[in-house]
Structure formats: structure tokens, C-alpha cells
Image: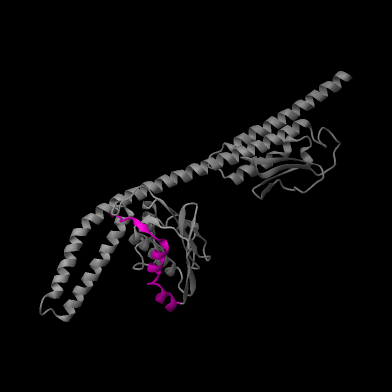
Amino acid sequence: MADDRLSHSAQAALIERVKELTCLYRIAQISGQPDISLQKIIQGIVELLPSAWQYPEIAFARITLDGISYTTEGFRECRQKQTAEIIVSGVPRGVVELVYTEEKPELDEGPFLKEERNLINAVAGQVVLVVERRQAEEDRLKLHNQLLHADRLATIGMLAAGVAHELNEPLGNILGFAQLAKKCPGVPASAEQDMGKIEAASLHAREIIQKLLVFARQAQPRKIRVNLNQVVEDGLYFFDARCVKEGIELVRLLSDDLPDITADPSQLNQLLVNLVVNALQSMPGAGRITVQTRCSDNKVYLVVEDTGTGMSKDVQDKIFVPFFTTKDVGHGTGLGLPVVYGIVTSHGGSINVHSKPGSGTRFEIQLPVTMPEYTEGST
């Protein structure tokens, strides 16, 4: 009789082990499926759990990950439950829970077996592996996209430099001949006006070429010791009247103790103008533009912030790509922000953008106070 009881107990234990191993095997199968979302994997795992416990008919499971709950049908909070934390890279991200909806006798851990403790810990570990693998895949894809973006920028930069050099000579001829034609005696007034339009269009095209060269870093900067506050004052001087006319408040928050930096003042002016123009174009009605300077950790900061329409994440990812623009045809070349990016990087700085639709945009430029050896007129 004792042998029969021992045999029955061993058989029951074996059945429980088979259930546990089957559960882990099926979890591995679900986790290994290609092209399946993380949400479906977690839901698939949670559906497998009740059958692996001693009383599957009254067992219900829930996995909470990053605040989102995945449950079996009929799950509810109960007194008798077993839990295991989901900890990814030392950070708690959620919990695995198994509950009994009816009271059961006390065993190793409440009504649960010691082996069930090991199982729920193993399930939490499998969830961690799934999350880490997905995170690694996302990081790899993000890095791949960044490399593609950098390669695309480099290619466009090379093309831009080549096209700019090729166009400079014919544009110079067009501009020169238009100016000569205007000076010819007896030119009708209408023809003189047309020549003026040709001259203006040529100058505009030349300005675009200069922007392309700055983006491609082909233009020769003239780096000297310059005070960023002075650059801001000089650049904003031309916007005061326009801002008043359009009902836009232009706020200056300039640090009193800003050290000089090594930079090309004309390029910094162009950087500021591009950012302010961009801010103005984002505010069809009244609003506020704040231009701030400060110094911290041997860096000088230029911040241009507006209360305009803001940008989506998708648009933010593309704003430094040449010729990308959300403006209507004829209202933007898509070169303003790429030029800003080129100027900042050529000065050894960095640029951060914070924006949300309907909440305005903030550009923060960081420039080093000290630069490597320089001479006036050096690149």
C-alpha cells in the first residue's frame, strides 16, 4: 500500500514536471517566431501558464510589462497568488502573476509547489530575454538607419558641392550680362525691369549655391574670436520691425558673462537667421520667439525657441535632410536647417531639437568655448 502511494506520488510529480517543461518549450517556440509582435508573444506566454500549474482549472495568469497588462480570460485579483518580477538590465519592468480563484491547501509556498516557484521565475526570465532581444533588434535597426542617413548626407554633400561649382560660372555670366544690359543706353523701361528680375533671380540662385557649399563644408570659413551675444544682437536687429508687424514677441535672454568663442561670425549670423526665419514661418498668427545665450561646462549655448505649430517625430527625423520641407512650393528650399547643421558641426558643436505638434519648437546649439589651433581665414 505504501509502495502504491509512493508510486502515485512519483507519477504525479512526473506529470507536473512534464507540464512545466512543456510550458517552457512552447514559450520558446512562441518567442522564436519571426515577424511576430512583442504584444502577441507576451499574450501567447500568458495563455500557456495556467496549464502548467497544479490546478489548471482554477488557475489564471497575468503578465504586466511597462504598465500594459496581458491576462487570461477570467483573471481577477485573488488572495492565493504567486508572482515573479520582470527585471531588465537592473530595472523593474513588470511582473508575472498566477492566481487560484479557489482556496487550496498550503504546500511549499502557500498552495504552490517549490517547482512552481522555479517555473514562474523561469517564465519571468524568458520574458526578460524576449524584451532584451527586441530592444537589441530595435537598437540595431536604429543604428542602421542612422548609418544610412549619414551616408545619404555625405553623398548629397558631395553632389551639392559638385553642382554648386558647376553652376557658379554660368550664373556669374548671367548676372554680369544682365547688369551690363541694364546699363546700355536706350533700353526700354520694360526690358530694364526684366533685366532687374534676371539679376534678382541670379543673386537668389547664388545664395542657394552658397548654402549648398556651406552644407557640403566647401565654403571657406573665417574663424576669429567672436562674442555670441553680439552676433545675436546684430542678427535680431533686422527682425524687430517684422515681429512687431506680425504680432510676434521677440524675447532676448542673453547671458552677461558669455566668453568669446572661435567662430566665423557670418556663418553664426546665417545660423541664427535661419533658425529665426524657421520660427517665424511656424507661427502664422501671434506668438513668441525666445533667443537665449548661456555658458556651462566650457560650452556656449544658443537657444531659439518658438510657440509655433511644432513638429511630429517623423518630421523631426528629416529636418536636417537637404531639400526636405513641409512648406508650400515657392516658400522654402529645404536647405535652411541642413545649412544650420553644417555650420554647427563645422564649428565642433552639436544641436538638439525638442518639439511636439502644437507645443512649439526648441533648438539648442552647443559650441565649444575653446577650439583647436586656428588662424584667421583658416578652415
238 is within the stretch colored magenta? yes
Where residue 304 sits: x, y (%)? Answer: 46, 63
Where residue 230 sits: x, y (%)? Answer: 40, 65
Tell me how the rendering is colored. Answer: one colour
In the foreground, 51 or 375: 375
Q: Residue furthest left?
A: 185
229 is within the stretch colored magenta? yes
- Tell how many labels: 0
Which residue shows up at 43% across the image and 75% down it?
243
Give the side of residue 133 with respect to residue 378, left or right. right
Which residue shows up at 36% across the image and 68% down it?
331
Indicate whether 321 appears above or below 56.
below
Can residue 30 be seen here? The reply is no
The segment highlighted magenta reads: 219-246
Which residue shows up at 52% across the image and 41% down it?
137
Where residue 54 sits: x, y (%)? Answer: 78, 34
In the foreground, 264 or 202: 264
Indicate whether 66 appears above or below 361.
above
Viewport quadrant of the N terminus = top right
Quarter-of-image position of residue 220: bottom left
In the foreground, 66 or 153: 153
Where residue 360 sits: x, y (%)? Answer: 50, 65
Indicate whether 247 appears above or below 110.
below
